């Protein structure tokens, strides 16, 4: 089992009226599994994804990665685990506007610091080639279409060969054709790279392409 949660709960107790974002969630993600998280707006889909991706800490419950309890790791250790083992794709691409597509993909590898600059550049370019973006490698994000920018974001998520990719509404801002391309790419990552992919989506057709669907309503998995 790649990732497992045990009665995971996230509450905002500091609010005037406490709010429970995720309640008592038990989730298992296997190696190489493609999983969709669906549910109504405001149901807790993104909150659950942020907990799974260690971007937010649970109020109670435990998270296990590769059988290891990581619930109480320090912020630095969590950041290192995310950088080495996880990749993220969001609804908005969050590419740095002053860097080219290639340079954006190189950033996670430079932060990890395990490759030479030559190796980083070669690997980043290979990611862009794999996703059909070779001719756009030296363009700035402002010179790319919305679909191309999101594909660069997927290449960046894949930069450090993560075992788990988490995507939050990755097609939410795309037209039908670009959405289909991104969906195909995520399926490609599962099939070719053996990544586990967890995607939050409100699109039922997108969800049907996944191996399994987790539905969350009012913070509870149903």
Image: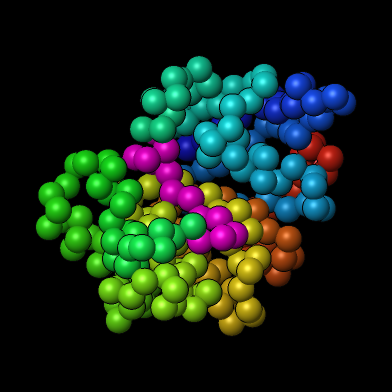
Query: Taking 99 as reference, is 9 left or right?
Result: right
Q: Residue 74 at x, y = what percent?
A: 44, 20
Vertical comparison of 76 with 53: above or below: above
Q: Is residue 36 visible?
A: no
Label total for image: 0
For the point 34% across and 67% down, the residue is 101
- 139, 90: nearer the viewer: 139
- 84, 121: nearer the viewer: 121
Q: Is residue 147 visible?
A: yes
The quadrant in which the C terminus is found is top right
For the point 44% across and 73% down, the residue is 142
- 79, 164: nearer the viewer: 79
For the point 27% across and 41% down, the residue is 112
Vertical comparison of 79 with 191: above or below: above
Vertical comparison of 47 with 145: above or below: above
Give yes or no for residue 192 being in the magenta stretch. Answer: no
Outermost residue, right direction?
Answer: 17
For the point 30% across and 73% down, the residue is 137
Give yes or no for residue 88 being in the magenta stretch. Answer: yes
Q: Residue 178 at x, y = what percent?
A: 56, 78
Magenta stretch bounds: 81-93
The colour scheme is: rainbow
Q: Residue 103 at x, y = what percent?
A: 29, 61
- 207, 99: nearer the viewer: 99
Query: Taking 219 as reference, is 36 left or right?
Result: left
């Amino acid at each position: 089992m790649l990732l497992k949660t045990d009665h995971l709960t996230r509450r905002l107790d500091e609010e005037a009226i406490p709010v429970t974002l995720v309640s008592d969630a038990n989730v298992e993600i296997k190696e190489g599994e493609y999983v969709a998280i669906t549910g109504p707006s405001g149901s807790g889909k993104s909150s659950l994804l942020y907990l799974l991706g260690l971007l937010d800490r649970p109020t109670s419950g435990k998270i296990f990665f590769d059988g290891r309890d990581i619930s109480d790791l320090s912020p630095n250790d969590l950041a290192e685990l995310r950088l080495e083992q996880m990749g993220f794709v969001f609804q908005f691409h969050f590419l740095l506007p002053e860097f080219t597509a290639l340079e954006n993909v190189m950033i996670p590898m430079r932060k990890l610091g395990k490759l030479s600059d030559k190796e980083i550049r070669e690997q980043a370019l290979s990611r862009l080639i794999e996703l059909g973006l070779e001719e756009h490698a030296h363009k700035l994000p402002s010179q790319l279409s919305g679909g191309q920018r999101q594909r660069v974001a997927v290449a960046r998520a894949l930069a450090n060969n993560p075992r788990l990719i988490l995507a939050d509404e990755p097609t939410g801002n795309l037209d039908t054709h670009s959405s289909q391309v991104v969906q195909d790419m995520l399926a490609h990552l599962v099939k070719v790279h053996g990544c586990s992919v967890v995607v939050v989506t409100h699109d039922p057709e997108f969800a049907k392409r996944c191996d399994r669907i987790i539905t969350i309503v009012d913070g509870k998995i149903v």
